[in-house]
Image (cartoon, rainbow, N blue to C red):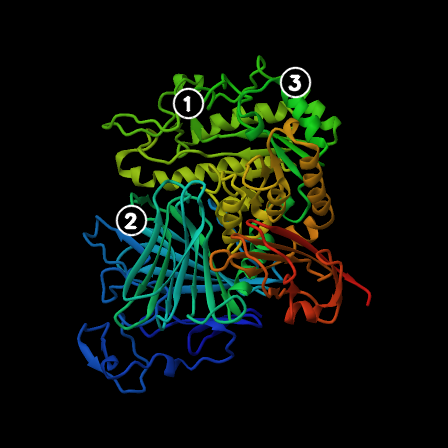
Amino acid sequence: MLIYYNEKERYFHLFNQRISYYLGINDFNYLQHFYFGPYLENLDLQNLTSRGDWGWQYLDKESNSEKMVPWTHFHYYEDFSMMELPTHGGFDKRGAPIIIHKPDLNTNYTKFTYVSHQILKGKPGMETLPSSFGKDEACMTLEIVLKDELSEAYVHLFYSIFEDLDVITRSAYIENKGKNSFHVVKAYSMTLDLPDDNYYLTHFYGDWCKEKNICRRKLHDGKERIQSNYGFTSHNENPVFFLERPDTNEKNGEAYAFSLMYSSNFAFEVDVSKWNSTRILFGINEEDFSYCLDENEKLFLPEVIMAYSSTGRGALSRTLHDFVRQHIIRSPYAFIDRGILFNSWEGATIDFDTQKICDFIEHSKILNTEVFVLDDGWFGRRDNDYDGLGDWYVNEKKVDLHRVIEHCHKQNMKFGIWFEPEMVNPLSDYYQNNPHCILKEDNNPLTIARHQFHLDFSNPKVVDDIYEQMIKILDTYEIDYIKWDYNRVVYETYSYAYGKERQGEIYHRLVLGYYSLLSRLIKRYPHIMFEGCASGGGRFDLGTLYYCPQIWCSDESDPIQRMFIQYNTSLGYPLSTMGAHANANPITSYQTKAQIALFGTYGYEMNPNRLSEKEMEELSEVAKIYKEYHQSVIENGTLYHISSPNETNFLGLQSVSKDQSTSLFLFMNLLKEGDRYRFVRLQGLDPEAYYWNSYDQQTFKGEYYLKVGMNFSRDWFDEFRCLLIELKRVEN
């Protein structure tokens, strides 16, 4: 049993051996939150809901008059109470997750009260959105139905708990069971109320090539709001954040994580009330959002993953990693070796012909490449950035794709290809023949970015058109891999496919179109591996990872900046999801570039014909390590953050195989450091086992590495010195 319902007290307990989540139905049929934290067998509701003298007062739901109740009485005070679905328009002024405009009732007051519930085995999916999954015997789901007292609006809340991980998932849908339409103008997936404010908020921020910088600050009175309104999750922000106690560190302390399974505009709010409680709201950004629901229509809200740790932020990250790999990524490539990848972009851009690509394939084979990807430039009239997008047919004057693929497969390499399905060039045939296929506001001049318009993926016909073009390619050519790119901000979001009253739906419908196209292609071509990309990490989120087991982490080719990006990304996402390549950037040696890229999905991006013999040797040595360790240690291993480059002069990342037999330790300094004592403690090893290490060729007991550490005191660390150390369990 993972979910228990106390019928007498009317409360629910979601639990496994490590965590508990309590919620219940109060005397007024509101759904209240009670507790989320370490496992707690019994909860004293009487004690938990006692507030003080002023809390004796409540509003009588029959007469609306104020009444006094005894000290011991279970009472309710809306502005103070911890809620699961707060009202809008009532006492509670801390923010509501759902707001509905009801023109037929001339009110926006929204008050959802309990109707029914059911406890389900397993984890139900969602009709229009990606969602986590789990086996019936390993997870359970609580569904609670609430009704707005003033309309026929119903909300179905879903809470899922997993036996093996300290995670609660939250999702919902809104349903109109009445004859009159209404508009949902705010649709957040979850509310969580915490009874104090002693937390630090950590989230990501950045820009193109500067993704996922860390911002950490103490909560204070008032509201913290982080959002994306770019039409995708964006380089600027990311839909994951953390709350930590002030004394929390890598190994100790209490911490929460929240991650949204969505690839469009999002927002989260962390609001400290006058009572020093903390309210968290997370979901679809309400800016430019208004969704009309007619009779019997539903609006599904994206899922939120909530993780908890009482043993530091490291354990929290590892919980997220395991959950993403086990319960988010649907691809069959989630746990299998995807192979070393070579991408043609930096070596060739769009300036290539058949022979040039065949030469690249042949030379890349020397580097142990297993997947060759032909990037932008193979389609339409794509000899520049001004044309081609939207015309998905092979430019046979430029490249003989059959010959290229045949040559690739003869080298025992898989072949991949680049698409940007959601964009169109104005000069393309598709746009010229379908001028209403794009987003465009009627009363404003049409603006262009990157020589592109954004296709109207809210329109099913446009999605169908692109689908038909893509399957002609995929049915004709033996494609094993697709890099799915996305390179433009969404604006002027007017769709000709919908009336004026539904233009507030377009941002959401765009992402539904994106998911729909991905889903249809994956169903038709289950053997193809899809990689997400949005000018690098602009759409790095759980929604994309549901379909694509990896996402290109950043367009940044500076390996030092890449090191920061990958380290920070790994706080919320596993290494196996991060596309990372060694390239021709002059900052460091190829060996260092490859070692950093190894702590990702690993590949190359350069002109292989220009590599020196020494550079080839450096890359080949790292490739050997990849073949031996990557699947067991990097893709499916357990990650430990040994030293943060955000706080120290050193990066330390260690990944350990699940059986603790092998480990890779990446250690790198930023600025030059001379002689000094330098011991670095490792994590994750079996303290009773013995491990040989490749740094000094010595063998020590696991306990020694954990309590004393690797001794680098004899080493001189020049600027950007990088060490990749292997550890193998051996017999004493």
N-terminal label among 1 and 2: 2
Query: Residue furthest toward the top?
Result: 397
Callout 2: few (<14), some (14-19), or many (20+) C-alpha neighbours within 10 Å?
Answer: many
Q: Is mark 3 on a helix, strand or loop?
A: helix
| 279 displayed left or right of 169 | left
Q: Quadrant of the N terminus?
A: bottom right
Q: What element carries label 1?
A: loop
Q: Do the residues labelled 3 and 1 touch (CB within 8 Å)?
A: no
Q: Where is residue 469 in the image (x, y as percent from the top left)?
A: 52, 24
Q: Distance between the residues labelled 3 and 1?
A: 27 Å
Label 3: which residue?
355
Query: Which mark is nearer the camera, 3 or 1?
Result: 3
N-terminal label among 3 and 1: 3
| 322 displayed left or right of 69 | right
Label 1: which residue?
425
Quarter-of-image position of residue 50: bottom left
> Relative to 572, is 369 above or below?
above
- Type of the residue with mark 1: Asn
Quarter-of-image position of residue 346: top right
Q: Position of residue 356 (x, y in %)?
A: 63, 20
N-terminal label among 2 and 3: 2
Q: Which residue is drawn at 32% across and 55% down?
A: 225
Query: Residue furthest toward the front?
Result: 675
Label 2: which residue?
185
Q: Is residue 664 visible?
A: yes
